Amino acid sequence: MDNLRSGRFESQLLGLPFLIRVSAVVVAELARGARSHRARRFVEQLSRRAPLAVPHERDWVLSGRLVQRLADRHGFEITKLRELHFDVLIALTARRSGAQLITSNARDFLAIREIMAFKLTAW
């Protein structure tokens, strides 16, 4: 999302020398927030270049349980829990495939990593 607003990581993302996968959840979030022509173009390029990683049916059930654990642990408000739910789905999808999750949203993903293990790189 940070890249969508600023374009700060566009060249790094599009220039990665290895196969990248993009969470279908991320593409949906990016498309929802793409207000400019440049932002829509970036989402289109990203979704064409990278195969989509899609949460499995069981990920949806497990994600609800994990979000509840985050609520119990941190006392997050409902708005924050809605945001975290998508992040939990992204983390579950990355973990299942053994992928490295790359984000500029270190705080939320570090909170998620307190309750489940997955590979994380924060830019």
Image: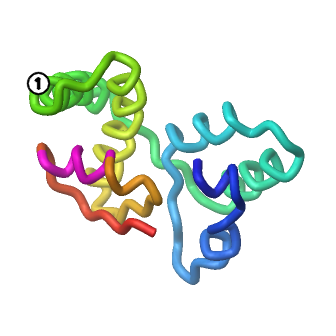
Image-based side of 81 in relation to 29, left or right: left
Picture coordinates of residue 30 (x, y %)?
Answer: 64, 41
Q: Is residue 45 above or below residue 37?
A: below
Residue at which label 1 appears: 72
Q: Residue furthest right?
A: 37
SS state under label 1: helix
Q: Return the residue nearer the eye: 25 or 2.
A: 2
Q: Main secondary structure of the magenta part?
A: helix
Picture coordinates of residue 72 (x, y %)?
Answer: 11, 24
- 112 part of magenta stretch: yes
Residue 51, image quadrant:
bottom right
Picture coordinates of residue 94 (x, y %)?
Answer: 34, 53
Q: Return the residue nearer the eye: 46 or 97.
A: 46
Q: What is the span of residues highlighted in magenta in the rendered image?
A: 108-114
Residue 71, image quadrant:
top left
Q: Residue at x 65, y 78 (%)?
A: 15
Q: Is residue 50 above or below residue 13?
A: above
Image-based side of 6 in relation to 20, left or right: right
Q: How is the image coloured?
A: rainbow
Residue 8, image quadrant:
bottom right
Q: Residue at x 68, y 51 (%)?
A: 4
- Type of the residue with mark 1: Asp
Q: Residue at x 36, y 27 (%)?
A: 80
Quarter of the image with the C terminus in it: bottom left
Q: Residue at x 31, y 63 (%)?
A: 120
Image-based side of 43 in relation to 118, left or right: right
Image-based side of 72 in relation to 29, left or right: left
- 110 part of magenta stretch: yes
